[in-house]
Amino acid sequence: MQLPPLSEGRLVRRYQRFLADVELADGRLVTAHCPNTGSMLGCKRPGSRVWLSASDNPRRKLAWTWELVEAGLADGAGREGVLVGLHTGRSNALVREAIEAGRLPGLAGYEEIRPEVKYGQSSRIDLLLTGAGLPPCYVEVKNVTAAVAGGGGYFPDAVTARGARHLEEMAAMVAQGARALLVFCVQRDDVCEVRPADHIDPVYGATLRQALARGVQVAALGARVTPAAITLERFLPVSC
């Protein structure tokens, strides 16, 4: 995925979940939209290098959007930091690109991908795959930005009752004869495995393990992130 032109700056603060104050390289102080509702553990330290995209849409309240941050490393590789993609809206498009390019095994033959399809109890699935002679496949995408020393990435970084509900509804679709696939989209290149964050949300972790036992599948894809592009290029193990 090619990114729009980005402007570099330094994070002043992230607040009210959706807002971030950033000092740009030219000294201007701007308020940017933060497209990530999680706690952003390890990704919101004041003074961190960040990259913003700009929109010329006059109907937008905020012209700037926070796209990337340079965070501390999880893999001990000796680099100064790692670029992390924070924009959760881009994770769906990244996974769709991977599916269309045939980089997710087991999904060959699906001819149509529909985003944001209603299902279950007032929920929407991120991607619904359909194809002649194949059971529909419900694909839920989760953006992973949190990591710990040793290369472990984890989800969620805050309690998510909504995420647990989605897992239960995906399992219900499997019981009705469909397929369901949870994809962890890891927008950083220093993570070597993904696991549920039981220390943050034990209910989500327990619900994930129950969903897997009921036939929901899981995969994790790791990205290479630069200020120019984000590319999913590695399969990562998921430890539950």
Image (cartoon, helix red, strand yellow):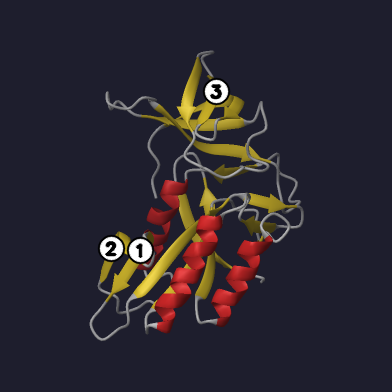
**Which dot, 3 or 2, sits closer to the camera?**
2
Q: Position of residue 125 (x, y in %)?
A: 38, 62
Neighbor class of circle 1 (other Cα within 10 Å; few <14, some 14-19, many 20+) is many
Whichever of callouts 2 and 1 sits on the residue coming sooner in the sequence is: 2
Whichever of callouts 3 and 1 sits on the residue coming sooner in the sequence is: 3
Q: Are marks 2 and 1 in contact (CB under 8 Å)?
A: yes
Snapshot quadrant of residue 70: top right
Q: Which residue is mark 2?
A: 114
Q: CA distance from mark 2 to mark 1?
A: 6 Å
Kind of residue at disc 2: Arg
Local secondary structure at mark 3:
strand
Q: Which residue is mark 3?
A: 22
Neighbor class of circle 3 (other Cα within 10 Å; few <14, some 14-19, many 20+) is many
Kind of residue at disc 1: Leu
Q: Is residue 136 above or below residue 100?
A: below
Q: Position of residue 75 (x, y in %)?
A: 72, 54
Whichever of callouts 3 and 2 sits on the residue coming sooner in the sequence is: 3
Which residue does the image show at 57% across and 81% down from the upper left?
Answer: 213
Q: Which residue is mark 1?
A: 127
Kind of residue at disc 3: Val
Q: Is residue 124 visible?
A: yes
Q: CA distance from mark 3 to mark 1?
A: 33 Å
Q: Is residue 91 above or below residue 182?
A: above
Snapshot quadrant of residue 3: top left
